[in-house]
Amino acid sequence: MTKNGQLSLTEGPILKTLSRLALPIMASSFLGTAYSITDMAWIGVLGAKAVAGVGVGGMYVWLSQGLVSLARMGGQVHVAQCCGSGDRKSAANYAAGAIQLTCVFGLLFAAVCLLFTDPLLSFFQLNDPVTYGYGKVYMQITCGLILFSFMNITLTGLLTAQGDSKTPLKANLAGLVTNMILDPVLILGIGPFPRIEVAGAAIATVTAQLLVMLVMVASIFRSDRQQNVIRNVKILRPVPGGYYVSICKMGGPTALQGTIYCMISMVLTRMVSAFGAGAVATQRVGGQIESISWNTADGFGAALNAFVGQNYGARKNDRVRKGYGLSLRILILWGILVTALFVLLPRPIAGLFFHEEDVIATAIDYLVVIGIGEGFMCVELMTVGALSGLGRTKLCSIISILLTGSRIPLALLLTHTGLGLNGVWWALTISSVVKGIVFYFAFKKVSSRLE
């Protein structure tokens, strides 16, 4: 352990080191899940149309994550590798470049969303004006102030790259508490506050994101300049151009992957919308419920990314392979647990978010089908973190784009075989199973070549 809560990832027992780094990240991921579930639970009180509207508007929030991942992944991997090799000056420059790119991307994305809200929402062909209105309000608020979310994602990556996963956890805990308080107050109108429904959910989310950012920034300013490379960042001072180029080369494939992944999901959402607002609401809420496993695996993948990056930079490749093996066993067990939860208890879970019986029935089908692939999805996400730590972001993107893209023709095929809406859910599950298997063997092949 070093100062400021940073872990030395290149020394000590692997399981203990990984656990101490991963547990706060996983806890932060659970808080992120709680964020989303809290929103959906309160919005669900307003009915399926409100949930569907938030789901559609939220698609552009999700789309934005692909853009910011360029700066986050590019900065995180380079900072981790530089810290592992002891080159802290370069690490500071990479951190500065990542933060500057994040600010630019956040402002540009917000401007586009505010200027072209109606054309962007029209893609989903929502015929119900109430659902459309909810989507427009939610999108304008959350995307218009997306910079707070962008900064949180990048700062979390840069802190984790240095072995500090506790600061993001503390910040996210403060944000969760704020969100849980503001949601019912602003959505339903409690006390002196007016009932502003979906707008209230959006305001609660953005306010919580702002608080998370402020907590992390305050923590960085209190840290030691010698220990935390972000402490030396001057946002308005440009770094040598080569650092921006390196960040874009490393993070570009991940950004492309995330953006295309979201676009594929948007096409699937458009297909789902043909089955009504209840189907769209199920997809939105189902995705949030599934984040129990998704966020956990992604959080562990972030820890593994930093661990692999530092050890690869220090040329300790045996620790890289051992760390992956331990992580694999843990995530498979977690995936099996989530599968059992979804398959055996779908009705109680669906009943927490929906009150119309037809929508509950649709949600039950979703949970049972999607639950089958949870373990494979966990393997996929943690392996992406490991491969990215080795600098193989392009390989990750190629595999993910090709196999995720197969969901569209597969869904078209299965929906016309008598499965109907369930054909879309089966397309998601089948592709997750295949991706988990392919990513596992990809890592085995790449790691076998390490000296």
Image (cartoon, grey):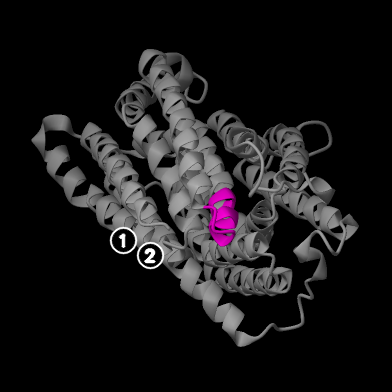
Is residue 310 highlighted in magenta? yes
Residue placed at 19% from the left, 34% from the top?
420
- Give the quadrant of residue 149: bottom right
Alpha carbon separation for disc pair 1 and 2: 6 Å
Judge whether 95 appears above or below 49 on screen.
below
Label 1's element? helix
Label 2's element? helix
Is residue 444 highlighted in magenta? no
Judge whether 191 appears above or below 444 on screen.
above
Query: Residue 398 — which label?
Result: 1
Residue 155 placed where, x, y %?
69, 58
Please identify the residue farthest to the front as the structure is shown: 451
Foreground of the two, 422 or 74: 74
Judge whether 197 appears above or below 446 on screen.
above
Residue 148 placed where, x, y %?
69, 58
Please identify the residue farthest to the right as the structure is shown: 222
- Quadrant where the C terminus sits is bottom left
Does the residue at mark 1 contact the one at mark 2 (Cβ under 8 Å)? yes
Binning the other alpha carbons within 10 Å of mark 2 as few (below 14), some (14 to 19) or many (20 upward) gives some
Q: Is residue 311 left or right of residue 178?
A: left
Q: Is residue 222 left or right of residue 2?
A: right
Q: How many marks?
A: 2
Query: Residue 113 — which label?
Result: none
- Give the quadrant of residue 405: bottom left
Binning the other alpha carbons within 10 Å of mark 1 as few (below 14), some (14 to 19) or many (20 upward) gives some
The three-letter code of the residue at mark 2 reads Lys
Query: Residue 394 — which label?
Result: 2
The three-letter code of the residue at mark 1 reads Ile
Residue span colored magenta: 306-316
